[in-house]
Each structure stands twice: as C-alpha cells, then as structure tokens.
Amino acid sequence: MGTEPFFIDQITAALMGTVVDEMARDFDTTVVYGKETTVDQIVEAAKRFPMMGAHQLIVVKEAQYLDRSIDQLASYCAAPQPQSVLVLCYKHKKLDKRKKVYKAIASNGQILETKPLYDNQVGGWIEQRGKGYGFSFQPQALAMLVAFLGSDLGKIDKELEKLTNSVPSGTEITPEVIEQNIGYSKDFNSFELQNALGQRNLALCYRIVKYMGNNPSQHPFPLTISVVFNFFQKLFMFHGIKNPADAPRVLGVSPYFVKDYQAAAQKYSMRQTAKVLQLLNEYDLKSKGVGASNLPLEELMKEMVLKIVSV
C-alpha cells in the first residue's frame, strides 16, 4: 500500500515471476481488479487448491477500490489458506490501520507501505536504476532528468528503459543523449533557467523563457517554478553552511553542483535569497490563477525573472 505505485508494481511483478513455476502459471495464477471483483470472489479464489504446483497466486490489483467492503476479508486473512499467496495492491493511499483486515494481515502476513522519494533522493535513485540498465550519468545529464521528469519513478523508469533501445550498455549518459532521446533541450529548460537566474543573467533568462513560452506543454509553469524554488531553497541553506565540505551532504546534491551554489551565493545574499523565495511563492499562486493578471504565460514568466534578478 502507499503513495508510490512504482514500488508496488515492481514487487507484484517479482511475485508473479517467482511464486508459481512458469509451467503452472496459466493454471495457478489469478489476477483480478478491485473495480471488477468482490471480496467473496477473492476469498473463493484463495480457498481453491492449486492445480499444478505447490502454491497458487491471487493478485488483486487496484485493491483500493474495494475500500468499502475490504474489511470483509478480515476473517480469511485471520486464517489464510497455506497453499495460497494473496497479494493486495492498494495504490495511492494507505489502508486504515484501524480496520480489522489491516490487523489480520499484520498478524498473519506482510504489509509494505511505499512512499515517494524526497526530491534530493531522486538523483541517487536514477543512478542506481541506471546501473541496472547498464548506464552511468554525467552530473548535468542526471540533473536534467530530475528537472524534467520530477519524482515520478514510473515515468523515469520508462524513459530509462527507452534509452536501452538506442544507447548501448556501458554508455555514459550526457546532456546530448538526453536531448536526442528524451526530447529535453539542454539549452532551454528549467535547469538552465535556474542557473541563468543564479548568475543574474537577464538576457539569457529571457531567451529561455521565450522558448518555454512557445512550448508550454513541455515546460509547464508550475513545474518550472518548482525547479527554481528548489534551487533557491538550497541556496538559502548554502548561506548557512560553515564548512563548504559539508555542502553536498546538507544540500543533497552531487559535489559537481556545489560550484553553482557558490557562484549564486556571490550574486544573492541570504536576505535576497529569502525575498526570491517569497516571489516564487507569489508567482506559483499566480500560475494557478490566484491574483493573476491577464498576462500571457511568457509575459508572466518574464515579469517573474525580472523581479528575481532585480532583488
């Protein structure tokens, strides 16, 4: 159960590939969906005996749609059939711990709660996942992936898997590879905008904003603000670090990127950085229609960057 469905899918796939022998899977594996089944049908399937092997596997996908009736599973889960492995995939939310079924599963089975990674953990996860596909990453390429794909692990994994079709195993992924295969420009993206803002380079900011304004579906304003906010939030933290050697650990970034925060710290004082964070909060609300003017998206972004470099 939990709000990170990628891990639920991965564990379910592993169980489906191991619990029942390949020769018996067509006979001893049952997959049902919460929207299309009932608790009675699940219990009936779980109480059957396997036809070919020692165990049968029953997977209930989207089990959260059984929320109103799921407590009826409590009696079965209190005394499960030893020959059946029942897997409940309860996505995007948590099963209420006060329910009888939760207590029965906790006593007689296993419960795993999956949670989204923190923003500063995503880069490390991509590196580890990439190793499984035979890739390594240049730091800027890794940062581009994080900026472009966010923390959606399923989406990230699909993009990494797609790279295996065009990039040989053992390749070091560069910004050019990201641009060619994922369609994310290394010159005009949120990552480059944050650096241009960090340098107070208004002309470059306007060039990037113009490109983003012409491609709003690839560069949604709220996502851009989120990336830039994350940068200035870390810059605010950087101002409070006494020992520069601690910066990668405190900021949760690769040592390669510390230089960007060192340079930006020369352009923005701690007080100015705090003011930038206030501006970003203001424009985040405007991008969502709160107190916004009738300015087109590109003009709203230009207004925002002008105010940031002028603090």
Image (cartoon, grey):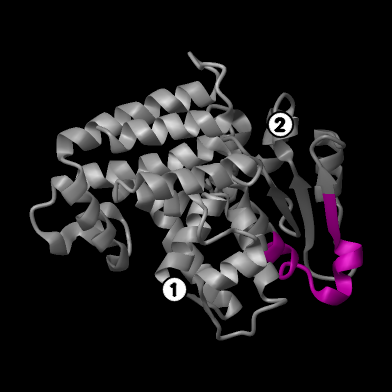
In the displayed structure, does residue 135 sit left or right of residue 276?
right
User: Identity of the amino acid at label 1?
Assistant: Gln
Q: In the rendered structure, which segment of residues is drawn in magenta?
A: 13-31
Does any portion of residue 202 appear in the rendered image?
yes
Residue 92 in picture, x, y percent from top left? 62, 38
For mark 2, what is the residue?
Answer: 70
Q: In which quarter of the image is the C terminus?
A: top left
Identify the element where label 2 is drawn: helix
In the displayed structure, does residue 145 sit left or right of residue 22?
left
Vertical relation: 101 (above or below) 244 = above
Vertical relation: 165 (above or below) 99 = below
Seen at 86% across and 62% down, the residue is 28
| Residue placed most toward the observer, 114 or 252 | 252
The mark closer to the camera, 2 or 1, is: 1
Seen at 84% across and 34% down, the residue is 38
User: Identity of the amino acid at label 2?
Assistant: Ile
| Residue placed most toward the observer, 100 or 14 | 14
Does any portion of residue 2 appear in the rendered image?
no
In the displayed structure, does residue 303 sit left or right of residue 189?
left
Q: Earlier in the sequence, mark 2 or mark 1?
A: 2
Q: Farthest residue in the left direction?
A: 242
Identify the element where label 1 is drawn: loop
For mark 1, what is the residue?
Answer: 138
The stretch drawn in magenta includes residue 16 = yes
Seen at 15% across and 64% down, the residue is 245
Vertical relation: 30 (above or below) 305 = below
Q: Quadrant of the N terminus?
A: top right
Residue 20 in picture, x, y percent from top left? 78, 68
The stretch drawn in magenta includes residue 25 = yes
Seen at 51% across and 74% down, the residue is 174
